[in-house]
Image: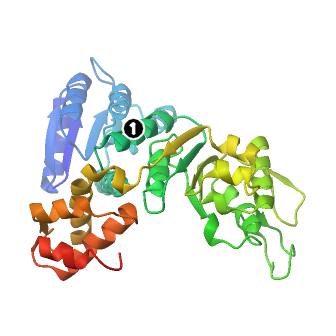
Amino acid sequence: MAKILIVDDEKSIRAALRDILEYEDYEVEEAKDGEEGLHMILNNHYDVALCDIKMPKLEGLEVLLKAGEAGRATQFIMISAFGSVENAVEATKRGAYDFITKPPDLNRLLVSVRNAIEKAKLVAETVDLKKRIFKINEIVGESAPIRKVKETINRVAPTEARVLITGANGSGKEMVAKQIHEKSNRANKPLVEVNCAAIPSELIESELFGYEKGAFTGAVKQRIGKFEQADGGTLFLDEIGDMSLSAQAKVLRALQENKITRVGGDKEIKINVRVIAATNKDLKREISEGGFREDLYHRLNVIPIHVPPLAERREDIPLLAEKFLYDISQEYGGMPKIIAEDAMQHLQSLPWTGNVRELRNVIERLVIMCGDEILLEDVRLYASFGS
């Protein structure tokens, strides 16, 4: 049942609105002035607040503003006997859902309340979805190496600094990149990912920078590249050590000038992109062997983050296994399974050359093949092949 707060200094108005709303089966509470209304909003959940503008102690627009500053998701419908355009515009600027004049038209009021409730639901669902996505990308572990990674993420995320993430395949470099983006000031803008190792060298430039119609055979229309797609947000260049030298030169120019040029074009396009790169290669060795540009390395390596292999953070395996058991149970349906203590100890003793990715594969295999409790013999059988 939707919950509505009426904030008005006129007792007769509060009583009339309460009667109307309770007849529609809404749960209704009252506040006799703005100060009391704000206190109730900050300490309770309301889907909608019907709030008078002119009130003693605290005016309605101040209640609206302070509730917004406190992060309350309550949708405000402002009500006033002074139905000027200026009041309506000011209320909308401060985040009000609607503005209704006194005495309110009954049908108009109920339609506005219903729509405000629907918006409140959508806002709540969006917040919940963001929390779930954030949890999916959460870096799990309390070992010293992982705490250091988390601390670095928290420090660097709010800045505009470029980050170079290093680590073995399957160690969680992509997860680190997503955490940096989600905790940054660009979180509401796109995170565009490019796997440089998966794109042939002859196509990487058109993938990154786009191309104009007729730039080459098969270019039948203009295409926007990844840099432009990420404008205002973050571009994650995964496995950048596999990028061709010619593409490296163009990426370097883009980072230096914040401009790109599409393949086959001559127009410079301004971009506002934060670049995060990752690699499983030793780029210093690649530089010495002529496979990677030293100037690009220094442009990317403003903040280095090394993700440790799973073998160096074995104390995190129980936490990771618990998370994977829960995630997989959500995917397949059913209750999460449990792992016997000696089975968990055996999991911690394995070499884990495939790192966190390999561990997840093994846990999924155990969930599928074993009973409600995963035993030592199960781990010995199913964690020993094809990981």
The reply to whether residue 249 is in sight is yes
Q: Position of residue 266 (x, y in %)?
A: 90, 58
Q: Nearer the viewer, residue 87 or 223?
A: 223
- Element type at marker 1? helix
Residue topped by disc 1? 148
Q: Type of residue at label 1?
A: Lys
Residue at x 13% of width, y 69% of height: 337
Q: Does residue 376 appear to the left or right of 193 in the view shown?
A: left
> Which one is in front, 365 or 284?
284
Q: Position of residue 323 (x, y in %)?
A: 25, 59
Which image quadrant: the C terminus?
bottom left
Residue 356 horizontal side relative to residue 223, left or right: left
Placement of 277 over or under 336, stated as above or below: above
Q: Position of residue 351 (x, y in %)?
A: 33, 63
In the image: residue 282, left or right of residue 298:
left
Nearest the camera: 182 or 250? Answer: 250
